[in-house]
Image (tube, grey):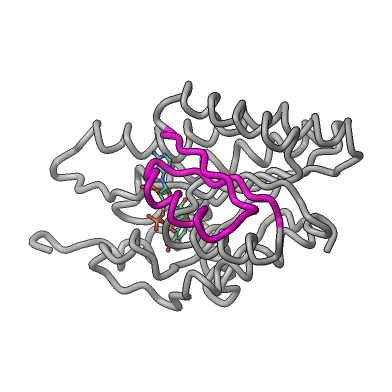
Amino acid sequence: MASLTGKRRIWLIGATSGIGFALAQRLLKEGHRVALSARGQEALEEIVKEYDNALAVPLDLSDRRSVQAAGQKIDEEFAGLDLVIHNAGTCEYLDVRHFDVDLIERVLATNFNGAIYTLDAALPLLRRARDSDGSQPLFAAVSSASAYVPLPRAEAYGASKAALSHFLESLRLDLAAENIDVSIIHPGFVKTPLTERNDFPMPMQVSSDFAAKAIIKGLEKRTLDIHFPKRFTSGVKLMGILPPPLRRRIGLTMTRKNND
Ligand SMILES: NC(=O)c1ccc[n+]([C@@H]2O[C@H](COP(=O)([O-])OP(=O)(O)OC[C@H]3O[C@@H](n4cnc5c(N)ncnc54)[C@H](OP(=O)(O)O)[C@@H]3O)[C@@H](O)[C@H]2O)c1
């Protein structure tokens, strides 16, 4: 495994539920030293109780100082990071009949600004690992297949993930000179507490464990765009490059009728 050979120092943000919980279990069982973050301290402690190689580092992505403090704590314990997986995120759909600026700000703050706070805290630790141990560090973040194409009601969520993917793709170019890699993860539908709330069909939905396996496989290969399940995400990518009138026609078939 290119990035995950040996025992790596990993920071996983959003480790207590869904995809992140499945990732935490796999990485900890493989013996890596993993700093686990989320808001819920109790849920973090529950995981740490079971593994000597786990460190609980609570934080709230809406609070920049708490993310910086988490980075400092990890630096004291791990003296650098080989891999960061920024997985945490939230999803709220917009009902345009009741335009809700607070909702849009909440989603952008967690999914976009939160990832920037993580980067700010993590970059010095990735550089430290590279300089002290010759590690080739990797920063990975979970975006979404919804970043590939605008879909109804996903104005806030889709924009937050498209902004994240765009930012990281630019960053990847600038960090190349520093020998730091960036992977962007674009899942289709995954069965988690986040999607349990959805009241619409979720084609080709996969389990959290399927997602964790696909993500780790992609990270091992240092894949730039990790997306799964391929049959679904390839279709969404294709829709994203269709001419706008055709894309609009397909998108309109997914909108809600007035009383839905
Ligand atoms: N499930 C899907 O179908 C799907 C598809 C595409 C992309 N994704 C993306 O995959 C990622 C994980 O999703 P999931 O479905 O596994 O969600 P989930 O089950 O709701 O888990 C979200 C995780 O993020 C943490 N988190 C949320 N807000 C946070 C905040 N403000 N500060 C710190 N931690 C926070 C949560 O812990 P606390 O609540 O304790 O903070 C939890 O550990 C998200 O970025 C999501 O957008 C999911």
- Above or below residue 93? Residue 22 is below
User: Which residue is painted at 36% across and 61% down in the image?
Assistant: 251
Q: Position of residue 60 (x, y in %)?
A: 41, 34
Task: Examine the image and state in which quarter residue 55 appears.
Answer: top right
Name the residue nearer the viewer: 252 or 157: 157
Side of 120 where 94 appears, left or right = left
Name the residue nearer the viewer: 249 or 213: 213
Task: Examine the image and state in which quarter residue 176 appears.
Answer: top right
Quadrant where the N terminus sits is bottom right
User: Which residue is painted at 71% across and 67% down in the image?
Assistant: 217
Q: How many marks?
A: 0
Side of 131 where 100 appears, left or right = left
Per the rendered image, the range of residues in magenta is 32-61
Name the residue nearer the viewer: 179 or 59: 59
User: Which residue is painted at 46% across and 26% down in the image?
Assistant: 66
Side of 123 where 121 appears, left or right = left
Q: Position of residue 198 (x, y in %)?
A: 27, 64
- Above or below residue 40? Residue 203 is below
Q: Position of residue 161 (x, y in %)?
A: 48, 45
Q: Position of residue 114 (x, y in %)?
A: 48, 34
User: Which residue is painted at 64% across and 66% down in the image?
Assistant: 29
Quadrant where the C terminus sits is bottom left
Residue 14 included in the magenta stretch of the image: no
Name the residue nearer the viewer: 188 or 47: 47
- Above or below residue 187? Residue 66 is above
- Above or below residue 178? Residue 205 is below
Residue 49 included in the magenta stretch of the image: yes
Q: Residue furthest right?
A: 134
Q: Residue furthest top?
A: 65
